[in-house]
Amino acid sequence: MSVVTDTTRNGVDTEKMFATLDLIKTQPELAKFQFRATNRWIDGAHNRSTIKGFYAAGGEDTTRSEEFQCDAGEPAILLGTDTGPNPAEYLLHALAACLTTSIVYVAAARKVELTSVESTLTGEMDVRGALGVDDEPRNGFERIGVSFRVTGNAPEEKLHEVVERAQKRSAVYDMVTNGVPVAVEVTTD
Amino acid sequence: MSVVTDTTRNGVDTEKMFATLDLIKTQPELAKFQFRATNRWIDGAHNRSTIKGFYAAGGEDTTRSEEFQCDAGEPAILLGTDTGPNPAEYLLHALAACLTTSIVYVAAARKVELTSVESTLTGEMDVRGALGVDDEPRNGFERIGVSFRVTGNAPEEKLHEVVERAQKRSAVYDMVTNGVPVAVEVTTD
């Protein structure tokens, strides 16, 4: 249950938001977060991630009462049995969710009341790369298209500014467009 | 229900896998896929993606009988109400799922029977970037750590080779490490 106060806009408590920003400005060490996911193979293309704990603001955050579970899979044409979205579709979802939340938070900070935020994301892939048939196509999407429809109590220009600012601040947009160093370790016992 | 034949290894129908690879080699135009996600803002940090249709092998794939729904959220410290994993956690899940499925498929192709594949992923983030408090830290994870434990009926060296090959072919690993061009369009009516 979120507590609705007169400082709440778009479902975001802006008083708490500005207090958080002020706190982090004076104590930047509180801004160090670590997020995690634990995954377990089930069968074939079916695997499941469990997500709960994370480190935030100087300590382990224990406010989450239950863990989240996400099941991944592949459709039949990619040799799975549709036990969940496939990993590349989950990446599109991560990007959509991050841009959307960024839009909602930026709008709240700028006193824009949104009425709707909808998006469709598409990713083009030549699966010869990931299937190892040809070295020329890359494994991942060649490009991603994001189409947003955003409505609210602000002029068109201001709504566009909100989306532009959200793009500049979205964590997943940054990662998907710029890449992140990934270190993989393996044990076999 | 997957049909188990004597060509099934790790839950993957290897006969179908090799037939698919052969088909794509002779008709590379069948390798053009498009995946999609549609997202809708609900309230605050809560939004939901719907995932069903995709384009594959020369036409729209209609084999999926139901759509998948993924709810995103943020924990209290990031001004949400824990309506789901946050977008950055979903990105970790996408990466874990893709590497895991790649390991399972590569092992199946190389006649390695796996007994378990488990992983823990961590992502370090200085949230000053995404919150717009400071321009210096990037918005996304500074780095991602992936720790795999893989067991099966093969020598340690072969299991390591399977993971290395999977890394080389994983679609999401490619995207997360190298980045993807993203084009954003916005309409406001």
Image (spheres, coloured by chain):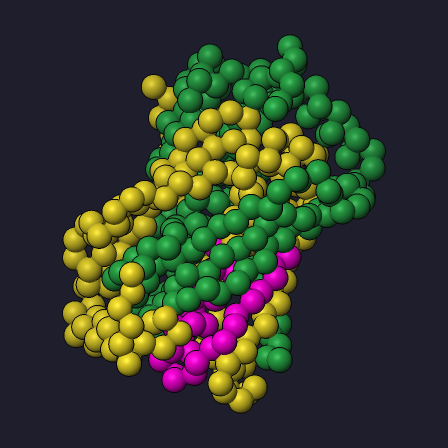
Chain colours: A yellow, B green
Q: Residue at x 16, y 57 (%)?
A: A58
Question: Looking at the picture, does residue A8 appear above or below residue B66?
Answer: below
Q: Does residue A105 show up magenta in the picture?
A: yes
Q: Does residue B76 show up magenta in the picture?
A: no
Residue A1 in sight here:
yes
Quadrant of the snapshot with the C terminus of chain B: bottom right
A115 or B13, nearer to the observer: A115
Horizontal relation, residue A23 to residue A94: left or right: left
Q: Residue at x 45, y 28 (%)?
A: A41
Quadrant of the snapshot with the N terminus of chain B: top right
Question: In the rendered structure, which segment of residues is drawn in magenta?
Answer: A94-122
Horizontal relation, residue B33 to residue A177: left or right: right
A160 or B150, nearer to the observer: A160
A41 or B182, nearer to the observer: A41
Question: Looking at the picture, does residue B136 appear above or below residue B65?
Answer: below
Q: Position of residue B48 (x, y in %)?
A: 49, 57
Q: Position of residue B129 (x, y in %)?
A: 34, 68
Q: Position of residue A22 (x, y in %)?
A: 21, 77
Question: Looking at the picture, does residue A38 appear above or below residue B89?
Answer: above
Q: Position of residue A160 (x, y in %)?
A: 54, 81
